[in-house]
Image (cartoon, rainbow, N blue to C red):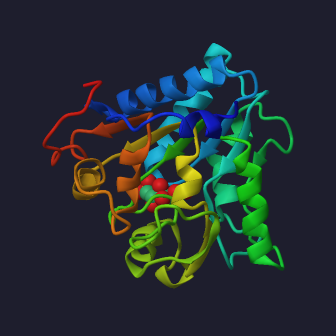
């Protein structure tokens, strides 16, 4: 049975929530989840997010690789999303960001990290190709959350059963991501993103949320109604979710979930 088939066979359960006090603790708890996946699967398939929330996790994975022999040699990894319209070598293209944050510092074999090809001439065909690649199953999908509740580039209003596709990036998200670019106008307006339905096919989801700017979104995601207006609320439909949040991001939660 593939990871996605085993996922479909189970029913949703409350997320396991870890609230941590410090950035190094957050990185360590999240890295334990990733290491658990890498160590227990024969051919682990990891879904990778980019962004500020996951940088500490990747730093801790690099440390464990260097100091504790954590190996990624058998791992295949898949980027969640990619900007459209940036040149191949652009430092902020997610394929290059993930190299700097993780891939260049651990022992992935060449070609082990895949992503949607933003330079494809037929983007629709590329989205279908990427979605089919993921259909073989992702064991663990790492996610961040946007201030507006987005996951990957699934902005509010995205269908909960959406698959990999070309999307417009909301102005709110463009403003939030402007901090990574030299000028706000440089932030692309479109991206390829895994759909919410694609993400939900992973066997396990790991959501990382940091900072008070994520508090309202995290509450809406975990405790609000499941609705396309809050894409991350789709996590409530999944049977196996771990959330690692700092105190600021979890400040608005009313009902602590398991694991705290
Ligand atoms: C990026 C991605 C996005 C980010 C989200 C939070 O691959 O999937 O959904 O996770 O925008 O970004 P940060 O962590 O920078 O606040």
Residue 109, placed above or below residue 82: above
In which quadrant of the rendered image does the N terminus lie?
top right
Q: Residue furthest right?
A: 110
Q: Residue furthest left?
A: 254
Residue 150 lies in what quarter of the image?
A: bottom left
The residue at the point 71 percent across, 49 percent down is 134
Nearest to the observer: residue 152 or residue 211: 152
Nearest to the observer: residue 43 or residue 14: 14
Residue 68, placed above or below residue 97: above
Q: Residue furthest bottom?
A: 185
Nearest to the observer: residue 6 or residue 79: 6
* Total count of labels: 0
Q: Is any atom of residue 117 visible in this view?
A: no
Q: Answer left or right for 15 relative to 144.
A: left
Residue 243, placed above or below residue 189: above
Nearest to the observer: residue 165 or residue 21: 165
Residue 208 lies in what quarter of the image?
A: top left
Q: Residue furthest front?
A: 9
Percent coordinates x, y for residue 4 in the rendering: 63, 40
Percent coordinates x, y for residue 164 in the rendering: 64, 64
Q: Is any atom of residue 241 visible in this view?
A: yes
Residue 25 lies in what quarter of the image?
A: top left
Residue 215, placed above or below residue 54: below
Percent coordinates x, y for residue 122 in the rendering: 81, 78
Percent coordinates x, y for residue 57 in the rendering: 50, 36
Q: Answer left or right for 87 relative to 156.
A: right
In which quadrant of the rendered image does the C terminus lie?
top left
The residue at the point 45 percent across, 76 percent down is 174
Q: Answer left or right for 60 relative to 248.
A: right
The residue at the point 54 percent across, 56 percent down is 197
């Amino acid at each position: 049975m593939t990871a996605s088939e085993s996922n479909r066979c189970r029913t949703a359960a409350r997320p396991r929530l870890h609230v941590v006090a410090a950035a190094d603790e957050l990185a360590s708890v999240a890295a334990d989840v990733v290491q658990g996946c890498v160590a227990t699967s024969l051919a682990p398939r990891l879904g990778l997010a980019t962004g500020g929330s996951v940088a500490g996790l990747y730093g801790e994975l690099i440390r464990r690789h260097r100091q504790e022999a954590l190996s990624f040699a058998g791992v295949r990894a898949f980027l969640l999303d990619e900007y459209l319209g940036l040149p191949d070598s652009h430092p902020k293209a997610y394929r290059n960001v993930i190299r700097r944050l993780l891939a260049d510092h651990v022992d992935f074999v060449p070609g082990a990290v895949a992503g949607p090809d933003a330079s494809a001439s037929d983007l629709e065909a590329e989205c279908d190709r990427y979605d089919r690649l993921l259909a073989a199953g992702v064991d663990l999908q790492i996610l961040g959350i946007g201030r507006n509740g987005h996951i990957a580039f699934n902005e509010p209003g995205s269908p909960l059963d959406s698959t990999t596709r070309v999307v417009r990036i909301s102005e709110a998200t463009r403003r939030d991501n402007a901090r990574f670019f030299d000028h706000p106008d440089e932030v692309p307006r479109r991206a390829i993103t895994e759909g919410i339905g694609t993400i939900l096919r992973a066997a396990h989801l790991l959501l990382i949320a940091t900072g008070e700017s994520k508090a309202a979104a995290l509450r809406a995601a975990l405790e609000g109604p499941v609705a396309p207006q809050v894409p991350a609320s789709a996590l409530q439909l999944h049977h196996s979710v771990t959330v690692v949040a700092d105190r600021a991001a979890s400040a608005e939660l009313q009902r602590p979930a398991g694991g705290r």
